Amino acid sequence: MAAEFCDRVRIEYVRVPMRDGVEICAKVTRPDDAGCFPAIMEYNPYRRLRQPLPNYRDEYPPAVPYLVERGYVAVQFDARGTGNSSGWNTDIYNLEEQQDACEMVRWIAAQPWCSGQVGMIGKSFSAVVQWQVAVQAPSALKAIIVRSANDDVYTEWVYPGGCLRPYMFDSYSGNMNAWNFAPPDPDVVGDRWYEIWQERLQQSAPWGIGYLSHPLQGPYWQQRSLSADYNRVQCAVFVVSGWSDCYPTALLRAFEHLQCPKKALVGPWGHWYGEEAVAVPGPRIDTRPLYQRWFDYWLKGIDNGVMEEPPVTLFVRRYSRPEARMPLEEPGDWRHENEWPIERTQPRTLYLTAAGLSEQPAGESGGDDLCYRPGSGIASGIHWGGGVLPWGMPLDQRLDAPQSLVYTSDPLPEELEITGTPRARLYVSSTATVAYFRVKLIDVAPDGTAKLVRYGGLNATHRNSHETPAPLPPGEVVPLDIPLKAVSYVFAAGHRLQIAIAGADFQNAWPTPQPATHTVHRGAGHTSQIVLPVVPAQDAPLAAPQLCPLPPADPQGLNVPDAYSITQDLAARTTTARLEVTTGDTANQLQLKSRFTVNDDRPADATLQATAHYHLQRDALDIEVHSEESTSSDQEAFHHQVHVRILRDGQPCFEKDWSISVPRTLN
């Protein structure tokens, strides 16, 4: 394909044949100089491979033009069956795609412009796939930078705590249907676009089928997950996340278990690179110099001292009032640590008692009853914002208190830092054989405002295993170990700690099917408790991190959903979340709409309707891809129907339906 020259870089598109004849479309951005350079690989299925922007420094992700100007080659490509690559795609993170990535590492290393040293970078999907390449240990892969990735696709993304995430169907699956059934871009592919598209239309399938068809942990998820064996990774690893993102827990856990050279950075941010113009909450920093130092050391052999620095850099958060939108800035401080988990941690146990949270267990047996309501949790927000980033954040948690068991401490006499993984140990019983428990750690300000700090949830039938769940014996007391998300947070003096327990988290866990009354037990051998990782100050404070600050995000640039609401029908006893989002420009526009409804009287009957519309316009081409999905449950099964129809120049040119029903497996 044709190459384009800018003032300092050369951009060209190539098609790389795989072992089975599928051609991967790659965009190569390299210094416009003779010589060999280390290469950085990034790939995803999100249709980002388009004609170069007028200013190459605006290319995404921001690290690409930055690194190329500093002596690296960037190789970005579309996963097979997506974007501008040929082939088809029926499943996220499929084995063929994983094998392609290893072939691409070898191909890159063998190119005349490459020094033979290869790294990887990427966020979200582009971060998860780095694990899938690294565990195969291609010899040329020397270092990776994993920005916002799960380490276990089952527990950290699709089925947290053993319950299906509604997000998989209110946003993600419809989005991917619309993109995966769209044609490649003729401006990039040329005349072969139609041939590639027809093969894709005939062979591809909606990804949501795979999500629902594998409701339990097992080989399907393990072959996609790092957690099956962390020791497989041999290259150097730099993990980066944000406390307002979805994956700091997974990345810090990966950091803890990896045996390779490693480094970790966790800032305050959501699902953005720290240097993106819309990265919130701040403080924003430019992470690109950090990436360059990492790659300079591992790919160029420059002894810049990066491995002599403390390996962990954290932003320690402090209280701010909850808002529906991520704030532009959060209060807190940057700090280095020498390890994770932190060795000086002093675990503190707080017990659930009739009087609230106490450092002494209840002296006599007792319990608190909780009526299960599937619509509980309207103030919890969407886990990491879902499809409405930066909206859908947790609100004042007092809204959820009437549907929760709430235990509150006395005011703190002095500030208290918790940094690590809080763990709830609950003793519960239920009238149902299937039940879900959501635990929230809350900071209560002197004025009563209740801010969500961290949370965790568990389908109690998964209390011993995500592979082989076991029903709850009705009325029998069982212990539950529920880890909350990792945290670094300072509770101010005068504030109170609060634990809230509910039987649902409406926007984040598909409701369990049976009406129920749960009981949380305390005292007399059933001492329900929360163990907090309390961290005192460093005896000899480490030097402060040297970071490149950036100004706060521009609020005018933040995405605003077309519609986002939660309504409760008190007569019908239903709760409904509605979401509408439009992204992209007129030439590449995606519109998402969804409606999720649960019923407090019939918890088995939940319904999620979602549509996605992708519009691709080029000089001689006008394509509209419409995806319509229905995902629902009853007492016996989950049901998923997908209808995809495509218009070309306003006329129907493709239509297909898929339908599956999957028996409920104690979920």
Image (cartoon, rainbow, N blue to C red):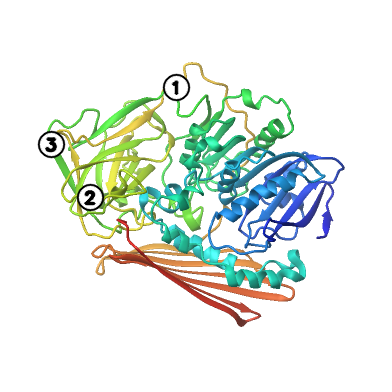
* Type of the residue with mark 3: Ser
Furthest residue to the front? 20
Are circles 3 and 2 on residues that touch, CB within 8 Å?
no
Instruction: Estimate the x, y position of residue 186 in percent, counting from the top left.
Output: 73, 68
Q: Is residue 385 above or below residue 441?
A: below
User: Dot 3: few (<14), some (14–19), or many (≥20) neighbours within 10 Å?
Assistant: few
* Type of the residue with mark 1: Ala
- At x 51%, y 52%, the residue is 390
* Type of the residue with mark 2: Leu
The quarter in which the N terminus is drawn is bottom right
Furthest residue to the top? 540
**Which labelled disc corresponds to residue 365?**
3
Furthest residue to the right? 34
- At x 34%, y 36%, the residue is 423
User: In the image, is 398 to the left or to the right of 224?
Assistant: left
| Sequence-wise first label, 1 or 3 | 3
Q: Nearer the viewer, mark 2 or mark 1?
A: 2
Can you see residue 646?
Answer: yes
Per the image, the residue denoted by label 2 is 472
User: In the image, is 574 to the left or to the right of 278?
Assistant: left
Q: Nearer the viewer, residue 11 or 433?
A: 433
Q: Nearer the viewer, mark 3 or mark 2?
A: 2
Q: Nearer the viewer, residue 2 or 659?
A: 659
Secondary structure at numbered mark 1: loop
Furthest residue to the bottom? 651
Instruction: Estimate the x, y position of residue 176 in percent, counting from the top left.
Output: 55, 63
Report the Cα–Cα distance between label 2 and label 1.
43 Å
Per the image, the residue denoted by label 1 is 537
